[in-house]
Amino acid sequence: MEPHTNFKLKVLFVEDDQFTLNTVTELLERLGVTVMAVNTVPKAVMALTKFEPNVVLTDLDLGAGPDGSDFLNHVDETYPWIGKVILTAHSSPTLAVDSGQRLPEGVTFLIKSLVTGQDIYKAILDSVDREQEPRHMSLETVDGIFVVSKSQAELLRMLADGLSNGAIARQRDRTLAATESLIHRLFVALGLGSDPDVNQRVIAVKMWQQGKVRIK
């Protein structure tokens, strides 16, 4: 398989075994992927906003503290557009998580002993394509009120303050492209189409000010 050429893939890799961390990171970097490798969930959560990955690749058993399922659920709730791939020694998703825990829908499950570097790379590419499909940007409403994440609510507050996309990107320490993508997804979450005669930014702010938006 040839390296992905449309954009520079960024993968956040979470693994507490140093040998696996180094080996997989080197494999992906040889395929042209930019990798940030960390060994704990707290480090991974901090890296999400700074690194802005396209995909998270994580083990499930990460030692003491939060595990991979905790991290994946955090990503799914806060950054639903990020692809999610599990790389674990467990043979089954059911056996891999504690009783009462769950894994988000659409997560790719890979078993360490059965996959090659190319298999991991393909799973990463597939997860990017899957998370970019329109069905992953569906509306969520409760009694006619649109429900948004905390991150999306933060964007709404900044829009209401009159900040431009560039100013929002600087304040949140993100790239302009990433910020524009987040704002677009916010508009989709609010049911705002792409009508050229409608100013989505103005309507979104009005909805926020009129109490038509609730934080998840």
Image (spheres, rainbow, N blue to C red):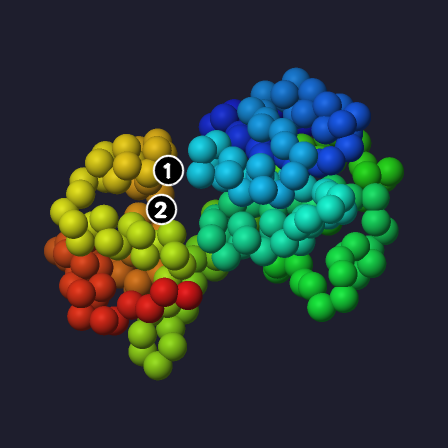
Q: Is residue 168 left or right of residue 23?
A: left
Q: Secondary structure at mark 1?
A: helix
Quarter of the N terminus within the rendering: top right
Q: Determine which quarter of the picture holds residue 14.
A: top right
Q: Secondary structure at mark 2?
A: helix
Depth check: 214 or 53 in front? 214
Tell me the residue at 76%/27% (across/down). 18
Q: Determine which quarter of the picture holds residue 163.
A: top left
Tell me the residue at 31%/78% (across/down). 144
Give the spatial CA distance, label 2 vs label 1.
6 Å
Disc 2 crowd, CA 10 A, few/some/many (<14, 14-19, 20+)? some
Give the residue type that dot 2 points to: Leu
Disc 2, disc 1: CB below 8 Å?
Answer: yes
Residue 89 seen by the camera: yes
Quarter of the C terminus within the rendering: bottom left
Residue 178's tag is 1
Q: In the displayed image of the protein, which residue is found farthest to the top?
A: 30
Tell me the residue at 31%/74% (across/down). 145
Disc 1 crowd, CA 10 A, few/some/many (<14, 14-19, 20+)? few
Q: Residue 136: percent from the left, percent from the top?
A: 48, 57
Q: Residue 160: percent from the left, percent from the top?
A: 17, 54
Give the residue type that dot 1 points to: Ala
Tell me the residue at 63%/29% (across/down). 37
Q: Is residue 168 left or right of residue 2?
A: left
Residue 182's tag is 2
